[in-house]
Image (spheres, rainbow, N blue to C red):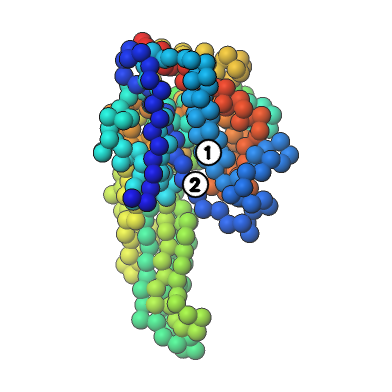
Amino acid sequence: PTKGNLVIRLHGQGKGKPLLFIGHLDVVEAKREDWSVDPFLLTEKDGYFYGRGTLDMKGDDAALVTNLMRFKQERFVPDRDIVVALTADEEAGGDANGVDWLLREHRDLIDAALVFNPDSGGGMSTGERRLYMGLETSEKIFVTFGLEVTNKGGHSSLPEPDNAIYRLAAGLGRIANLSFPVRLNATTKAYFAQMATMESGQKQRDMIAMTQPKPDPAAIRRLEASIFYNAMLHTTCVATMIDGGHAENALPQRAHAMIQCRMLPDDTQASVEASLKKTLADPAISVSVITPAAPGPESVPVPAFVRKVEAIVESMWPDVPVVPDMDAGASDSKYTRGAGLPTFGISGLFTDIDDNRAHGRDERIPMDGFYQDVEFTYRLMKNFSAAE
């Protein structure tokens, strides 16, 4: 009752099941004291739009709504309905994820033959150079664990060896050094194969090695030195929140930390939890599941689909290749894929590979990049609304 979803339908000629676009409305929290501008006031500065959610993902939401209005102004009637669902609780992982709820309670509103989610995929750049357009076909799965140590506590003037905060901190230190095995899937192998055609020298050889049945360990070490490539090669777990104690003059009775893991699509919650417990190696640190995993299958694109995406990209950026992409994050695509709806992530917004500010301080997008995203979204919506 405290959450809202907005479902908009542009009626077509009824030639086939609808085309669905999904986008979330909620954002990650932002503290004013951490930012150079007000995070909740859209600010134009130095050629950028600043504000929480500009990148993730109110810019793409705005592009979707703008183009629905443009279609109405142009009196465009698509072959099939175009549905846009703007939904709640993607970031929070809260009690009423909009896409999940709509699929369970009102599937008729968003049932579709094909789903696009601009929250994943999209353009990657470095400086002024556009590298590639990512077509997201699979994504890592997130699961959040809670670690907790409890103690009888006492007066701070009488320290004891068994301190809840120290014990938890020691366990977190071991988690920091935990590395999961390297595994590749069809999407990541295709990604490295195509990226190798755009590279040269050692990096090209390393990427080619990733496509082999047994990748070269030295090539793996060089690639995983990049946090971007490391996330594509491994399941990862990282501490994101910590709290403990109840008074400055008392020994802590409780210390608690949140660990968020981003699992490769073929990994499991049970195996990751087992790895955490083995690494902690301390029965005094309890492990609980805060947000369980919601796995989603891979969406395998047929060649004709890819060619159509490539043609739209080429119409705007002739030298930019389309590359299959496994999202290192997670998105609402897991719900539509889990419901059997073919789902692909793509956005016309290019993100600097070395300056991705989603969820971070001073989130921003280039102003000219936003308007190009609006035009790309228009072409994508219009082309894929044609009956086939």
The C terminus, quarter of image: top left
Q: In the rendered view, tell whether residue 233 sits above or below residue 131.
A: below
Position of 166 compared to 32: left or right?
A: left
Position of 330 compared to 342: left or right?
A: right
Q: Position of residue 311 (x, y in %)?
A: 52, 13
**Which residue lies at the image location 46% right of the left edge and 67% below the top edge?**
243
Judging by the rendered image, the residue that carries numbered circle 2 is 27
Q: Position of residue 88 (x, y in %)?
A: 40, 44
Query: Mark on residue 161?
Result: none
Q: What amino acid is found at the position of numbered circle 2 in the picture?
A: Val
The reply to whether residue 144 is in sight is yes
**Which residue lies at the image location 65% right of the left edge and 34% below the top edge?**
366
Question: Which of the two residues, 180 or 325, is positioned nearer the viewer here?
Answer: 325
Q: Residues within 10 Å of mark 2 (few under 14, many from 20)?
A: some
Please identify the quarter of the rendering in which residue 373 is found.
Answer: top right
Q: Residues within 10 Å of mark 1 (few under 14, many from 20)?
A: many
**Which residue lies at the image location 68% right of the left edge and 52% below the top edge?**
36
**Which residue lies at the image location 64% right of the left edge and 52% below the top edge?**
38
Question: Which of the two residues, 295 or 66, is positioned nearer the viewer here?
Answer: 66
* Count of numbered circles on the image: 2
Query: Mark on residue 58?
Result: 1
Identify the mark nearer the N-term, 1 or 2: 2
Q: In the rendered view, tell whether residue 118 sits above or below residue 171.
A: above
Q: Give the CA separation, mark 1 to mark 2.
A: 9 Å
Q: Position of residue 157 (x, y in %)?
A: 49, 89
Please identify the quarter of the rendering in which residue 299 is found.
Answer: top left
Q: What amino acid is found at the position of numbered circle 1 in the picture?
A: Lys
Q: In the rendered view, tell whether residue 73 sits above or below residue 363.
A: above
What element does badge 2 sit on? loop
Label 1–label 2 contact, CB within 8 A = yes
The reply to whether residue 337 is in sight is no
Question: Which of the two residues, 370 or 200, is positioned nearer the viewer here?
Answer: 370
